[in-house]
Every structure is written in structure tokens, then in C-alpha cells.
Amino acid sequence: MEEQIFQQRTDLSALNEAVMSIRNEIKKIIVGQDEMVKLIITALLADGHVLIEGVPGVAKTLTAKLVAKSVNAGFSRIQFTPDLMPSDVLGTPVFNPKEAIFEFKKGPVFSNIVLVDEINRAPAKTQSALLEVMEERQATVDGRTYPMSAPFMVLATQNPVEQEGTYRLPEAQLDRFLFKIVVPYPSETEEGTILSQFHNMGNTVPLDMIKPALQAQQIIALRQQIKTQIIEERLLHFIAKLIHQTRNHKSIYLGASPRASLAVMNASKALAAMQGRDFVTPEDILGVVPSVLRHRIILSPDKEMEGVTEDDVIKQIIQSMDVPR
């Protein structure tokens, strides 16, 4: 009887093989940053967008490009600047003199994996061009709607230190990112390894060392497979309770939305699958909660003045709760 039940379980061998292949390809270039790589792959499988925050030079853009290169799908990069217009992102109608009609010339956002570098450098008008694209996987230009090709994912980077020439991302746009990943400096040992590795590379171009490990159609199939992951009712209640706590916490001015609940559920399903399991555990949920919530809550002004961070408050909430076992 037990054997029969086991045979009905989801086969995750193809998914695990794909994840290991992507990780191995990225490790050819990137030293450390395992958490960032793990979360980007989780978001890719959970059909979510990622915001990567860190000071210049910690391999944010390089890692995003390596992930895109390890997937055999369309890739485009948009460098956000203060003078960037929405048409530079979405595209624009161009007059065709032969046909005497306007034809829509698609912008760089029409791809599978889109890297938006220094997203906080563009003004609100250009930021808003991404809102519909990220949530509804379509763009409306001149009254016509153009769907994005699946799979579609936005990887955005931003610098938290530099304030000159930057624009704060609106809450509505932040809420559309599945994860906000904070990238730390490497340790002294890792930095030594980075120097040795790049010295030994010589004239080799890092991106040329990466081979595609996953096809676009495989991603679509794996995403469908992940949606069928088993998650117990008690864990769904735990997610709901955790998100509800953010709306009633004395340190939080604005709590997380129901979109955050769905993000935690979908991301924990993907993380469980990456661990080789077809069911979600409390550890999977706790593994994604900080990255799902840190950009979705706004601290009260007095806590900000005290130097309390979003991660500190999220940790307090988790510690105050009974984690199901």
C-alpha cells in the first residue's frame, strides 16, 4: 500500500537535475552568494520577479546575466537612467511609408528574462511602464494590448547607498516583486578566491563559460509541476496568520497584502521542490518569508529613527509565533 502511494507522488528528478545544472554553471564564475542564487532560481520556478539590492561591485548584475545565460530563452537588458522614457522600455509605433500605416516596434521588455539595471534611477513615469508588464504579463500601447511570451521574468538591481539621481520605487511596484534579495559583501576568504579565479581566467570572457542548462519550455512545464506541490491546511493557516501579524504589529505602519500570502505559498512550494520534496514544510516557509516581506512592509517612523530594520521586525514576528511541526 505504501509503495503504491509513493508511486503516485510527483517525480522531481528532472527539476532537481535542472536546478543543479544551473547552480553548477553559475559557480564557474560566482564565488559564494549561494543564498542569492538559490532565491533567484526559486523565483524563476515560482513565476516571480526579483529585486536585487546591494552596493556596487557585489556581482548583482553579473549573477542576473549568468542565470539568464544558463536558461536557453530570450534575454534583454535595460539600463535605467533619469532620462529614460516609457517608450524606451515598451516600444513605440513607427510609421511604415510603404504600407502607409503605423507598426508597433517592440521595446526590450518583450523578452523572456529582462534585466533592469539600477531600476531606481528612472523617474515614476518610466517606473509605471513596468507595472502592467510585471503583474499581467502584457503591455498596452496606443489602446492595443500585446502579451509577453512565456516564461517572463524581471530581474532588477538597485543600489541602496547612492541617493543622487535616484527615485524611490513606489509601493505598488515593490509589491509586484516576489523577492527582495539583499546582497552582502563577500567574506575575506571568498574575496581571495574571487581574485585567484579571475586571475586564472586570463582572457576568457566569463559569460562564454556558461552553457544553457534549461530550455524555455522546460521552465513552463516545471512551473506547472510546482503548482501541484502538497501543502497542508495547517501550513496555509500559518502563512495567513504570519501575514496578518504584519498588519497588527506596533513597529509596522503598513503591513503586507494578500499578494504576500500567495507569494510565500508559491515560493515555499518551489523551494520544497528544489530540496527534492513534493510537500512543503515549515522550514520552506520560514526560508522565503524574509525575502518576500522585507520590501512589502513599511516601518513606523519612530522605529526607523531607532535604526530598526524590516528584517529585525520580521524576525520578531516569527519568534513570537508557534511554528507548526
Image: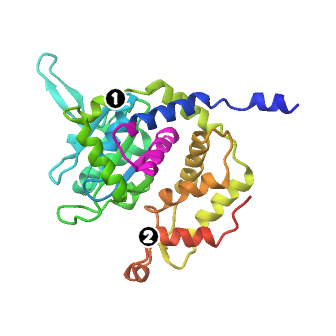
Q: Looking at the picture, which amino acid does disc 2 mark?
A: Ile
Q: What residue did someone put label 1 on?
A: 74
**Range of the magenta residues?**
26-50
Mark 1 crowdedness (10 Å alpha carbons): few <14, some 14-19, many ≥20: some
**Given this view, does label 1 or label 2 mark the residue nearer the observer?**
1
Q: What residue did someone put label 2 on?
A: 298
Majority secondary structure in the magenta region: helix
Does dot 2 land on a helix, a strand or a loop?
strand
* Quarter that holds the N terminus: top right
Residue 154 is drawn in which quadrant?
top left
Residue 314 vertical position relative to residue 84 in the rendered view, above or below: below
Query: Which residue corresponds to the image point at 69% horizontal and 43% vertical from the top-left?
Result: 279
* Disc on the earlier residue, 1 or 2: 1
Q: Position of residue 123 (x, y in %)?
A: 22, 56
Do we see residue 186 in this rendering? no
Do we see residue 263 in this rendering? yes
- State yes or no: residue 113 in magenta: no
- State yes or no: residue 31 in magenta: yes
